[in-house]
Image (cartoon, rainbow, N blue to C red):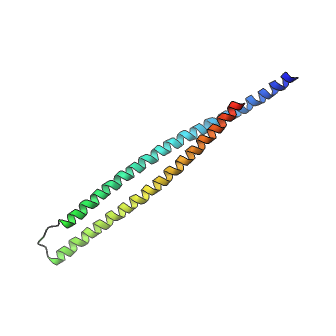
């Protein structure tokens, strides 16, 4: 009688373990996908940081060129050139701000992905423990 109960419980547990295996596999795949997504987001963030650095350098060069502009122009020529340089500076400032916003969005996305990754790892640990118990 005890042996039959044991065998029945053992069979039930084996069935439950078999049913949990696909979920465990799916969770591992989800973790792999999240890792790939994290890597992709890190690459995008690094690229945005590089672009931001490039924009800063270009902005400094532009400001330097404004300071070292050629002399001997009429007031009207100076006004036109100054306006053109201001327009360029505004354009670079806008791109700089855009890169900063993009960088912040990427940071938020990376943080969210890392949180989800942690949650998935915790879920896998719980499932593995429950599998070990049976």
Residue 109, above or below 97:
above
Q: Nearer the viewer, residue 23 or 117?
A: 117
Give the left or right position of residue 103, taking residue 121 as reference: left
Q: Nearer the viewer, residue 83 or 125?
A: 125
Residue 124 position in % (x across, y down) = 62, 38
Q: Residue at x 81, y 27 (%)?
A: 8
Residue 81 position in % (x across, y down) = 21, 71
Q: Quadrant of residue 26?
A: top right
Q: Residue at x 58, y 37 (%)?
A: 28
Count of residue discs? 0
Q: Which quarter of the rendered picture does the N terminus lie within?
A: top right
Give the left or right position of residue 117, taking residue 55 as reference: right
Q: Residue at x 53, y 51 (%)?
A: 112
Q: Residue at x 57, y 44 (%)?
A: 118
Which residue of the protein is positioned furthest toward the right in this rendering? Answer: 1
Give the left or right position of residue 10, taking residue 79 as reference: right
Residue 73 position in % (x across, y down) = 13, 73
Q: Which quarter of the rendered picture does the C terminus lie within?
A: top right
Which residue of the protein is positioned furthest toward the left in this rendering? Answer: 72
């Amino acid at each position: 009688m005890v042996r039959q109960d044991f065998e029945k419980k053992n069979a039930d547990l084996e069935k439950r373990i078999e049913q949990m295996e696909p979920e465990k596999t799916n969770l591992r795949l989800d973790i792999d996908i999240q890792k790939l997504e994290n890597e992709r987001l890190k690459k995008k963030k690094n690229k945005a940081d590089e672009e931001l650095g490039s924009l800063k350098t270009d902005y400094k060069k532009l400001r330097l060129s404004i300071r070292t502009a050629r002399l001997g122009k009429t007031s009207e020529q100076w006004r036109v050139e100054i306006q053109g340089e201001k327009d360029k500076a505004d354009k670079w400032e806008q791109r700089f701000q855009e890169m900063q916003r993009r960088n912040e969005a990427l940071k938020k996305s990376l943080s969210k992905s890392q949180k989800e990754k942690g949650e998935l790892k915790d879920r896998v640990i719980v499932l593995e423990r429950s599998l070990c118990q049976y």
